[in-house]
Image (spheres, rainbow, N blue to C red):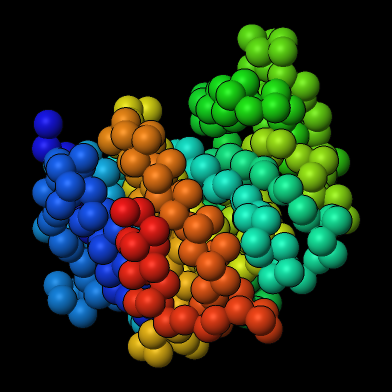
Amino acid sequence: MTHKILILPGDGIGPEIIAEAVKVLDVFRAEGSLQAEYEYAHLGGAGYDAAGHPYPEETRKLASESDAILLGAVGGPQYDTLPREFRPEKGLLTIRTDLGLFANLRPAILYDELADASTLKNEVVAGLDLMIVRELNHGIYFGQPRGIRVLENGERQGYNTATYSESQIERIARVAFATAMKRNKRLCSVDKYNVLEVSELWREVVCRVGQAFPEVELSHMYIDNAAMQLIRAPKQFDVIVTSNMFGDILSDEAAMLTGSIGMLPSASLNASAVGMYEPSHGSAPDIAGQGIANPLATILSAAMMLRYSLQLPELAARIEAAVEAVLRQKLRTADIYVSGCEKVSTAQMGSAVMAALK
Ligand SMILES: NC(=O)C1=CN([C@@H]2O[C@H](COP(=O)(O)OP(=O)(O)OC[C@H]3O[C@@H](n4cnc5c(N)ncnc54)[C@H](O)[C@@H]3O)[C@@H](O)[C@H]2O)C=CC1
Ligand SMILES: CC(C)CC(=O)C(=O)O
Ligand SMILES: [Mg+2]
């Protein structure tokens, strides 16, 4: 069967890192282990520039016809003053809801070879392997009402609303418990129960869903403590489940445990196996066009795509082994460079992963 993969390079470093992931997938296409057709389309600032919209109609159509989507990243300072509905981030948020991609899996794994690249002590992070399950379609990024209003005294007030319904919490909790069942059977639900009603309901529903998973040890933690514990003793966590914004923040924090944000892949899944795969980082405008971005998070996202959407776990495992191999060869992009290693460009890193696959 030929899989349809939609490729959305996006903005900033997006096209540079996507090119490397495609190089790696092309090795499988050439050897015949992956039957796939690519379509390319615009998302984010690239969509605005090409079609006047961050999620052009053409992209929406191709996305709805695809088995899986591989995305670079979106955003850039040149778009930050556009009306909000035309900004790149709005395009990203809309494709996520359009396809119902409510479950965002962000694995934070420290490869042994990168222990020295982490800013944390080796013994704190060595062997780290945690999974953040972030709800991606609801919460404060989407809740209504939102806006900037003028108060009676003439002062302007910005406001957003964090909402979660029972069914929205229930389905992400189910994904998290099922994920924990396949791992070490420990799930920590992160919320702000002591202050927010939305967290009160979150906790109640997570506990209720947990009754169907008696083997999973469920704990709860407030977001402020979780942010601290993630740095103090990250290996206490197996799976973390949390809301959209808390998961967004915690996953960037977790990225630094792995050495660099350039190492953290992600999968965004809906109720069927269709998924969008992208690095957890943004478009890194500060280094775009220099050929120095780390492509490994994107290459590892392609591995997640093979595992979760295309049901090709053996190819996913080959990519992961190849990434480990290049790190063992001491090849490092600038973000994970330590002395004694060889500093390589984005393209050299992608080529090294390709070579290690063979
Ligand atoms: N999924 C997406 O498309 C996301 C898009 N953004 C957008 O990206 C733009 C930049 O946002 P920032 O807050 O600067 O976050 P960012 O994640 O793009 O960059 C933060 C820092 O990490 C570095 N970095 C990120 N990815 C890297 C890589 N692969 N290799 C080496 N270094 C890397 C950057 O150079 C920068 O110093 C904004 O427009 C933002 O809205 C931010 C997060 C996610
Ligand atoms: C740019 C935002 C819409 C998303 C984000 O930061 C993320 O998904 O990590
Ligand atoms: Mg983020």
Residue at 44% over, 54% down: 322
Q: Quadrant of residue 149?
A: bottom right
Residue placed at 86% from the left, 50% from the top? 233
Q: Taking 41 as reference, is 240 above or below it?
A: above
Left or right of residue 50: residue 240: right
Of residue 320 and residue 257, the one placed in the foreground of this image is 320
Considering the image in quadrants, where does the C terminus appear?
Answer: bottom left
Do we see residue 285 in this rendering? no
Q: Which residue occupies 72% across, 13% down?
A: 215
Question: Vertically, is 193 above or below 204?
Answer: below
Q: Quadrant of the N terminus?
A: top left
Q: Quadrant of residue 118?
A: bottom right
Q: Nearer the viewer, residue 153 or 2?
A: 2
Relative depth, front residue between 222 and 319: 319
Q: Where residue 279 appears, x then y in whole percent?
A: 45, 60
In the image, 98: left or right of 101?
left
| Residue 70 sits above or below residue 66 on the image | below
> In this rendering, does residue 131 appear at all?
yes
Give the tally of numbered discs: 0
Residue 299 image offset from top left, x and y in percent: 39, 58
Looking at the image, residue 249 sits to the left or right of residue 233; the answer is left
Image coordinates of residue 239 in percent, x first then y, are 67, 36
Q: Which residue lies at the image location 68% right of the left edge and 17% below the top edge?
A: 210
Quadrant of the rendered image containing residue 115: bottom right
Q: Is residue 214 above or below residue 239?
A: above
Give x and y (percent) for residue 11.
Answer: 33, 75
